[in-house]
Amino acid sequence: MGQGPGDATTGHLWAIDPDECRRLLADAGVGRVCWQAGPGLTVLPVAYGVHDDGRLGFRAADGSILAALAAAGPVDVAFEVDDLDAATLTGWSVLVRGSATAWRGEFPAGLCRPWAPGERSTGVQITPQSYSGRIVSGDDGQQGEGT
């Protein structure tokens, strides 16, 4: 049996340093927040922004599971963003570990634009404690432009 793009022996993996992780986070706009909720691990997509001080922020509907996350804070969370190209088997992924709480102070206008319909009046912040990331390439090992 020959090796092909789907074989685990092809492709390459590079670590992304924390500064580059922060740059990629600033540009992504949609990520996934993961935490231990009552029924078990929960992962939800959110539209978010990065505040000047490095906090990640997003808005949640009152009474939602995300608003409950903010009210229960601080809660340990993981936050993940990525950009993947299935055709070329290339992309990057950034993981932030931190704590989530209700937003301190007034939620900045324009920090993020919710992509789901409805009122979102609860501000949630994630205070990062660590950053890690990686670039994945299904090619011959040459990092492409923009990865």
Image: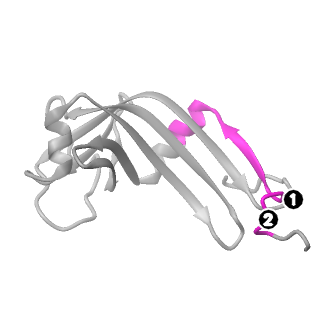
User: Which image quadrant for residue 30?
Assistant: bottom left
Please identify, in this view, whether the residue under mark 1 or under mark 2 is nearer the observer. 2
Name the element at disc 1: loop
Q: Where does residue 140 sit, x and y in percent of width and height?
A: 87, 59
Alpha-carbon span between mark 1 and mark 2: 13 Å
* Amino acid bearing label 2: Asp
- Total marks placed: 2
Residue at position x 67%, y 52% in the image: 147
The stretch of residues the image draws in magenta is 5-23
Q: Mark 1 sits on what residue?
A: 140
Residue at position x 83%, y 57% in the image: 9
* Amino acid bearing label 1: Asp
- Mark 2, Cα crowd under 10 Å, few <14 / some 14-19 / many 20+, is few
Q: Where does residue 101 sit, x and y in percent of width and height?
A: 22, 32
Q: Mark 2 sits on what residue?
A: 7
128 relative position to 70: left or right: right
- Quadrant (top left, top right, bottom left, bottom right) of the N terminus: bottom right
Q: Check the image and name the residue furthest to the right.
A: 2
Does the magenta segment cover residue 19?
yes
Name the element at disc 2: loop
Q: Is residue 47 above or below residue 18?
A: below
User: Which image quadrant for residue 116?
Assistant: bottom left
Does the magenta segment cover residue 81?
no
106 relative position to 27: left or right: left
Q: Where does residue 80 sit, x and y in percent of width and height?
A: 46, 47
